[in-house]
Image: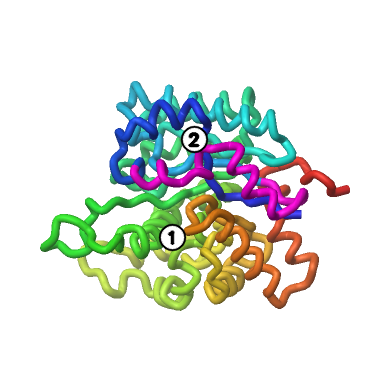
């Protein structure tokens, strides 16, 4: 049994209204050429390869909802997207076990209303947000009500990285070259967002908050020494801010807060990275995901990720936690078809 936690699909109405028009230049160019991202019949055909035990938990692909309109326009885009995802889950429950609702993050009041509607009326089992909101960090006080409400409702937040070519790699340049903004920028984005959530005290205030980081925590697991012993010396490198006082005020080490996050296995078949992330987060905080359909050929990321997980030197009980058990527990999901 396998629950593919973090993969993406555009419902028909949402795709036609916001994506196929070409209004979002870079993302639109890419996704219009991916058949499995909006063609339901083709998507189901790709999934057929992985048997009856394979099911997907759906989220919308990029761009973030807030990129689709003003604060007065984005709530309608979120509503259309979430209605479409809910309909897919209702019509194909054996294929799509649930969905994470999209949030119009440039309108926090609308976010809270849409969260309530999506959870109570549509049956959403989580929400999806991005690592920044049009350049604004997630630890900005503006967004705390969203975290607070997610914790109160005990629903998971699926956190997706976002950064564009307009974020240069050097101060002397105007844009990022060679798609570095994606290849290296997105893992950095995830790591920064996690760190800001930690140091802003959000996890101290909301200790039961559940945040799933796409791509297994970005850079954080690989840099365990730097975020561990390195941040145990927070303030030793800074003279204009008293970070030592901040460090003393924290109830745990920074690394212990970082290990409160969850991570998915969407590493495109990277076995060493998967082992690194699993050792960092622990088996109870790692969930199977493929990031389909962004693979070079249909089904490749699912196939390669399964190959990696099956090769891990862990027992069957732990492998089952990664494949479906952790998702069932975290998202309060129904059991996959065929499981007693």
- Kind of element beneath mark 2: strand
For marks 2 and 1, the one nearer the N-term is 2
Q: Position of residue 190 (x, y in %)?
A: 42, 57
Mark 2 or mark 1: which is in front? 2
- In the rendered structure, which segment of residues is drawn in magenta? 29-55
Q: Residue furthest right?
A: 340
Queried whether the magenta region covers residue 278, the answer comes back as: no
Q: Residue furthest left?
A: 172
Find disc 2 in the rendering and name its residue: 102
Mark-to-mark CA distance, 2 and 1: 34 Å
- Kind of element beneath mark 1: helix
Q: Is residue 191 above or below residue 108?
A: below
Q: Is residue 184 above or below residue 86?
A: below
Q: Is residue 200 left or right of residue 5?
A: left
Q: Position of residue 30 (x, y in %)?
A: 37, 47
The residue lying toward the viewer, choosing from 252 and 65, is 65
Q: How is the image coloured?
A: rainbow
Q: Is residue 285 left or right of residue 293?
A: right
Q: Position of residue 195 (x, y in %)?
A: 41, 59
Asked where in the image residue 22 lies, by quadrant, the reply is: top left
Q: For label 2, count other residues whose C-alpha is less than 10 Å away and answer few (under 14), some (14-19) or many (20+).
A: many
- The quadrant of the rendering that contains the N terminus is bottom right
Q: Residue at x 39, y 39 (%)?
A: 64
Q: Position of residue 309 (x, y in %)?
A: 66, 68
Find disc 1 in the rendering and name its residue: 249
Q: How many badges with numbers are in the image?
A: 2
Queried whether the magenta region covers residue 37, the answer comes back as: yes
């Amino acid at each position: 049994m396998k629950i593919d936690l973090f993969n993406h699909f555009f419902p028909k109405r949402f795709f036609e209204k916001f994506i196929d028009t070409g209004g979002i230049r870079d993302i639109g160019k890419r996704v219009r050429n991916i058949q499995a991202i909006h063609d339901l019949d083709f998507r189901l055909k790709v999934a057929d390869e992985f048997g009856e035990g394979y099911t997907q938990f759906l989220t919308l692909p990029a761009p973030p909802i807030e990129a689709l309109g003003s604060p007065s326009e984005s709530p309608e885009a979120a509503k259309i997207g979430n209605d479409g995802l809910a309909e897919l889950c209702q019509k194909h429950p054996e294929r799509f076990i649930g969905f994470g609702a999209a949030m119009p993050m440039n309108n926090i009041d609308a976010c809270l209303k849409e969260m309530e509607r999506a959870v109570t009326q549509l049956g959403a089992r989580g929400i999806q947000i991005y690592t920044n909101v049009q350049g604004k960090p997630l630890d900005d006080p503006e967004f705390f009500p969203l975290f607070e409400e997610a914790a109160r409702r005990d629903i998971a937040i699926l956190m997706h990285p976002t950064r564009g070519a307009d974020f240069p790699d050097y101060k002397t340049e105007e844009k990022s070259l060679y798609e570095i903004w994606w290849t290296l920028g997105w893992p950095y984005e995830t790591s920064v967002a996690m760190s800001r959530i930690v140091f802003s005290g959000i996890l101290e205030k909301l200790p039961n908050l559940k945040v799933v980081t796409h791509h297994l925590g970005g850079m954080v697991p690989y840099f365990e020494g730097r975020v561990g012993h390195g941040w145990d010396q927070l303030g030793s490198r800074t003279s204009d801010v008293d970070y030592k006082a901040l460090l003393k005020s924290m109830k745990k080490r920074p690394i212990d807060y970082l290990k409160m996050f969850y991570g998915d296995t969407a590493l495109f078949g990277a076995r060493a990275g998967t082992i690194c992330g699993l050792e960092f987060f622990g088996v109870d905080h790692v969930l199977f995901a493929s990031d389909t359909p962004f693979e070079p050929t249909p089904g490749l990321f699912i196939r390669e990720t399964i190959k990696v997980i099956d090769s891990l030197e862990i027992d069957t009980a732990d492998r089952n936690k990664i494949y479906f058990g952790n998702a069932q527990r975290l998202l309060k999901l129904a059991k996959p078809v065929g499981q007693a």
